[in-house]
Amino acid sequence: MAQRREPGILVLAQELASSIEKHVEDREYSPTYLISEIGGKLSRVLIAGVLDQIENRGSEEDPFYTARVIDPNGDYYYLQAGQYNPEGAAALSKLEVGVPVLCVGKVRARTPEDSERTYVSVQPESIRAVTMKEVNHWAVRACDGLMLRIKATKAFDNEEDFGKLKLNDREIDGIKLSREFYQSVALENYQALLYNCLTRLAGGELESPESEFTGEFESAGDNIDAAVQSEKEKPETKVETEISKEEKPEIEVETENVTEDKKTDDNESKVMNLIRKMDEGDGIYYDDLGIAISMEGVDGPMLDEVLDSLTDQGLIYQPRFNHYKEA
């Protein structure tokens, strides 16, 4: 099987900016990961927001673009693309300030010799203008990932609670590495980040906004309100679910299997439809497919599983590296 790139992890700007510890795995071609304080294992990220600044600090012949993107919470991503990333530089040059964007890129951390501060930036591989609806959809899914990492960090020392979260290998590894790198973490800061971001998406008002964000993000809908609930409500629902499982174990297991099979079939249909729709003759590039399918609720690791399944079934193939086409 051809080697694939790292999946693009959805992460809010505040968590990314605090991801200053580096990790390289003991394997061939391992990328340099940035480990966030709450366990994000980041090599490539999928970010979104409003393009706030863009500048060519090089020349027309040798461009070096820097850009700033405001995420839905009002925090900043910093983007850079120069001669070693001509595709990213070309993509940035076509965008205008004020447009909503989705971007897939590699993360970089740099600590100047005369400074103790570490600067985290994103080198865009693919960036395109989108709608605010797409940005809000991305933000809800980014909050899902943030919430999971918060729960995993809190539950890490309790083997039973940690196991209930059903994390994948990458997520478990990220949590373990964060514990090794960061001796203490102000978890309340990330809980506040989650609450503030969801409140903004729901169209609510913050009592004391901490950022200077001035962009107008349209409401993501009333259904977001359900995500802004107290930590006390969720354990009660969970306990009720667990009691039901004990009373009716056979029915629960059977229902769970059927639901999982249906979810797999749905994801395969979504990917196939996108490949048919977006393929202009040479197949659809993995990154472009990843951005498009993320709006359908399919993340990087899940997309890889779907692509493997569709390939095994003979429904798709790779006409060239990292491009997918209907068979």
Image (tube, rainbow, N blue to C red):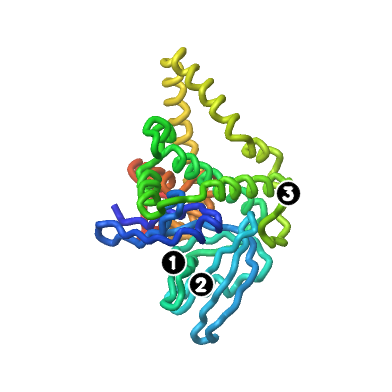
Crowdedness near tag 1: few (<14), some (14–19) or many (≥20) residues, C-alpha within 10 Å: many
| Left-right relation of 262 to 202 | left
> How many C-alpha atoms fall within 10 Å of the one at disc 2: few (<14), some, or many (≥20)?
many
Asked whether 226 or 189 is in front, the reply is 189
Disc number at residue 91? none
**Cα separation between marks 1 and 3:** 34 Å
Of residues 247 and 274, the one drawn nearer to the viewer in this rendering: 247
The x and y percentages for residue 78 are 54, 67
Three-letter amino acid code of the residue under disc 1? Arg
Name the amino acid, label 3.
Answer: Glu
Circles 1 and 2 in contact, beta carbons < 8 Å: yes
Q: Nearer the viewer, residue 2 or 134?
A: 134
Residue at which label 2 appears:
80
Marks 1/2: CA–CA distance: 10 Å
Question: Nearer the N terminus, badge 3 or badge 2?
Answer: 2
Classify 297 as above or below 291. Answer: above
Mark 3 lies on residue:
207
Q: Residue at x 52, y 26 (%)?
A: 238
Q: Nearer the viewer, mark 1 or mark 2?
A: 1
Question: Any mark on residue 108, and which?
Answer: 1
Task: Answer yes or no: is residue 285 visible.
Answer: no
Mark nearest the camera among 3 and 2 is: 3
Number of residues whose C-alpha sits closer than 10 Å to that of mark 3, classed few (under 14), some (14–19) or many (20 or more) = few
